[in-house]
Image: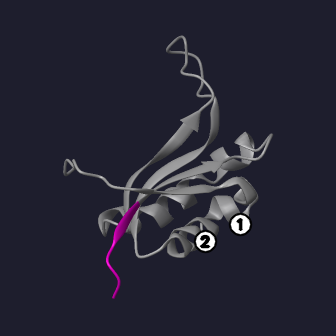
Amino acid sequence: MSQLNDYLVQIPDKPNVLATRMSNVQAHMVRLKPLVESGVIVMSGPTLATHPKTADEGLAINGSAWLVRANSEQEVRTLVADDIYAKLGVWDLDNVTVTPFKCVLRKPL
């Protein structure tokens, strides 16, 4: 088995997919839960075009970001491609960035 490495993953959404994203968030979270529990995904959340200016304003979601521990970039890309957001066309897979990263500080949940 290869050494696990850290990767920062940025996954942009395609245009006009917020309704599809929101109607499938539960299935997305069900899939992520075991990956988080096993330590494969260290951090996950939506990226925003801007922060809300008021408490009533919705989130301007424009993609997702992960911190992943994996053996290779290809393993990370497979995790992304296997997600329901990828399968339903929410994520723009042609523009995913997977950046090698060295996480030196971690705080357990």
Q: Which residue bears the numbered disc 1?
A: 87
Furthest residue to the top? 54
Mark 2 belongs to which amino acid?
Asp
Query: In the rendered image, is residue 76 in sight?
Result: yes
Mark 1 belongs to which amino acid?
Lys
Quarter containing the N terminus: bottom left
Q: Is residue 47 above or below residue 76?
A: above
From the image, give the main secondary structure of the stretch colored magenta: loop
Q: Is residue 26 magenta?
A: no
Residue 80, given in percent of the width and then of the height, sits at 58, 65
Residue 93, given in percent of the width and then of the height, sits at 71, 59
Q: Is residue 93 above or below residue 49?
A: below
Q: Nearer the viewer, residue 86 or 96?
A: 96
Q: Is residue 42 left or right of residue 15?
A: left
Q: Which residues are magenta?
A: 1-6
Furthest residue to the right? 16
Q: Which mark is residue 82?
A: 2
**Residue at x 31% of width, y 65% of height:** 39
Q: Nearer the viewer, residue 18 or 100?
A: 100
Q: Is residue 42 left or right of residue 8?
A: left
Mark 2 to mark 1: distance in Å?
Answer: 7 Å
The answer to the question of whether label 2 and label 1 lie on touching residues, with beta carbons closer than 8 A, is yes
The colouring scheme, among rainbow, by chain, secondary structure or one colour, is one colour
Q: Please tell me whether mark 1 sits on a helix, a strand or a loop.
A: helix
Furthest residue to the bottom? 1
Residue 20, given in percent of the width and then of the height, sits at 72, 49
**Residue at x 46% of width, y 62% of height:** 32
Q: Which mark is residue 34?
A: none
The 10 Å Cα crowd at callout 1, few under 14, some 14 to 19, many 20 or more, is few
Q: Is residue 55 left or right of residue 94?
A: left
Query: In the rendered image, is residue 91 in sight?
Result: no
